[in-house]
Image: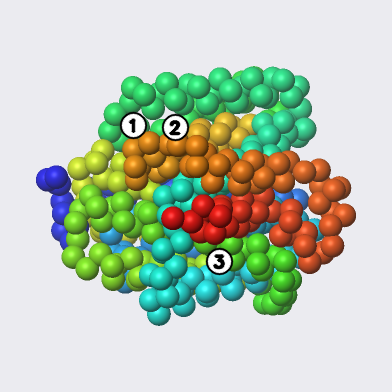
């Protein structure tokens, strides 16, 4: 395919900034979504939630810069990893330091595995059925979180009204995705969140309170770091399995762009890119935020814009770094109502499920009974465990609670046993 600007070409400055703004319009909504979900679990004070999003924006700026200049060196956008949200949710009841210590250890393990070449051997475990199941599990095990978002008591609106609003908004997003083209389609999530917030303000007037929790236009965020390392074996093991899912996401994202652009030394780019992701997750654990991953939606943006220059993401990194220093800006961003975030996350999860089903049938072009069994039982177990009442999970022994109560972990372990032991080919 011919591109307006190829991988190592630099567009003129005006175009470079405009293309960087477009990438930023894709990243910001995901920061809001992931940030709001984690904050609902961990943080009660509005100021702490704003601080969390500032740190996340700074982390993305650093990671993007390192990936574009030192890592995979491809036009791949980076953002907080949804799969790590599963570990955060399961880590409820344990200290934040134990959760983010586990993020640091997981990032270190990923960086070492990729940097030493060990990851290349582990890739043999990632058969199409395993990868498909992991993609499905991410969506299904986050379903309870979506339910909480679209039934927020703080919205001062009946639950039925909130659920109806979320359903209508999600269907309108699918309708728009069907007919929009180019930049409008690639930034659909951003415009949907803006329109959804405005509609929510009209229907539920108390749901939107703009910027009341921050008084400073500029405010730095180097506080509340993870300096007290706490090792909880159950939480640590839970996150290591989540990092298995993160590595699959990272690998698939880099290879998908590689397949589109055919750059030289793709294997080396994969190793460098995943190594940078691991190191960035170490930094994320220290900052006390969810770690980053390369997003697989990047090829669609490249195709839509016709620009494959990696340098278009550098303005995005600079703008994210500037945004990270403004608590007032993130106070405005954090004003998006929970029901809007839930509707957008439902839309994204639908694409996650579609991607999983597509991967499942990709290798042979068919889906037989054995495929259904290998994927069906882990998916069912993972979903059931994700919906277990908190009181029941809380009755588990502390060591087993983040393991046996983690639907994602149980699903991944089950599919590995079925794929490589019971139905081994």
Labelled pair 2, 1 in contact (Cβ < 8 Å)? yes
Identify the element where label 3 is drawn: helix
**Where is residue 100 shown, x and y percent of the image?**
65, 67
Identify the element where label 1 is drawn: helix
Whether residue 51 sits left or right of residue 269 in the image: it is: right
Distance from disc 3 to disc 2, alpha carbons, whole Å, reads 28 Å
Give the residue pinned by disc 3: 284
Labelled pair 3, 2 in contact (Cβ < 8 Å)? no
Other residues around mark 3 within 10 Å, as few (<14) / some (14–19) / many (≥20): many
**Where is residue 25 shown, x and y percent of the image?**
40, 43
Q: Is residue 314 above or below residue 19?
A: below
Labelled pair 1, 3 in contact (Cβ < 8 Å)? no
Quarter that holds the C terminus:
bottom left
Q: Residue 63 appears in which quarter of the rendering? A: bottom left
Identify the element where label 2 is drawn: helix
Quarter that holds the N terminus:
top left
Other residues around mark 2 within 10 Å, as few (<14) / some (14–19) / many (≥20): some
Give the residue pinned by disc 2: 191
**Where is residue 143 shown, x and y percent of the image?**
64, 38
Could you tell which of marks 3 and 2 lies nearer the N-terminus? 2
Q: Residue at x 60, y 26 (%)?
A: 166
Distance from disc 2 to disc 1, alpha carbons, whole Å, reads 8 Å
Asked if one can make out residue 287 in the rendered structure from this viewpoint, the answer is: no
Give the residue pinned by disc 1: 184
Q: Is residue 157 above or below residue 303?
A: above
The residue lying toward the viewer, choosing from 90 and 288, is 90
């Amino acid at each position: 395919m011919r591109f307006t600007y190829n991988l190592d070409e630099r567009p003129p400055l005006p175009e470079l900034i405009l293309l960087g703004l477009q990438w930023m319009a894709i990243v910001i909504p995901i920061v809001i979504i992931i940030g709001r979900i984690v904050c609902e679990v961990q943080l009660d004070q509005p100021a702490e939630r704003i601080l969390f999003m500032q740190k996340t924006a700074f982390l993305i700026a650093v990671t993007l810069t390192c990936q574009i200049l030192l890592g995979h060196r491809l036009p791949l956008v980076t953002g907080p990893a949804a799969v790590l949200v599963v570990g955060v949710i399961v880590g409820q009841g344990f200290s934040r330091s134990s959760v983010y210590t586990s993020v640091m250890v997981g990032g270190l393990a990923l960086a070492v595995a990729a940097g030493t070449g060990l990851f290349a051997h582990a890739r043999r475990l990632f058969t199409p059925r395993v990868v498909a199941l992991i993609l499905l599990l991410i969506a299904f095990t986050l379903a309870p979180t979506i339910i909480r978002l679209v039934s927020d008591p703080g919205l001062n609106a009946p639950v039925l009204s909130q659920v109806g609003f979320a359903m209508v908004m999600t269907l309108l997003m699918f309708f728009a995705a069907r007919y929009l083209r180019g930049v409008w389609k690639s930034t659909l999530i951003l415009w949907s969140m803006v329109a959804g917030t405005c509609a929510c303000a009209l229907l539920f007037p108390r749901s939107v309170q703009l910027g009341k929790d921050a008084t400073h236009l500029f405010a730095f965020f180097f506080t509340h770091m993870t300096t007290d390392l706490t090792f909880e074996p159950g939480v640590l093991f839970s996150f290591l399995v989540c990092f298995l899912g993160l590595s699959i996401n990272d690998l698939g994202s880099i290879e998908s762009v590689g397949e589109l652009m055919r750059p030289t030394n793709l294997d080396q780019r994969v190793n460098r890119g995943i190594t940078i992701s691991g190191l960035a997750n170490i930094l994320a654990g220290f900052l006390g935020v969810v770690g980053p991953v390369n997003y697989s939606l990047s090829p669609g943006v490249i195709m839509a814009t016709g620009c494959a220059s990696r340098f278009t993401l550098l303005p995005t990194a600079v703008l994210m770094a500037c945004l990270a220093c403004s608590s007032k800006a993130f106070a405005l961003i954090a004003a998006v109502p929970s029901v809007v975030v839930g509707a957008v996350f439902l839309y994204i999860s639908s694409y996650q499920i579609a991607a999983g089903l597509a991967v499942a049938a990709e290798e042979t072009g068919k889906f037989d009974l054995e495929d259904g069994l290998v994927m069906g039982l882990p998916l069912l177990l993972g979903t059931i465990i994700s919906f277990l009442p908190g009181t029941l999970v809380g009755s588990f022994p502390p060591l087993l609670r983040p393991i046996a109560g983690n639907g994602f972990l149980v699903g991944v372990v089950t599919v590995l046993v079925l794929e490589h032991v019971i139905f081994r080919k």
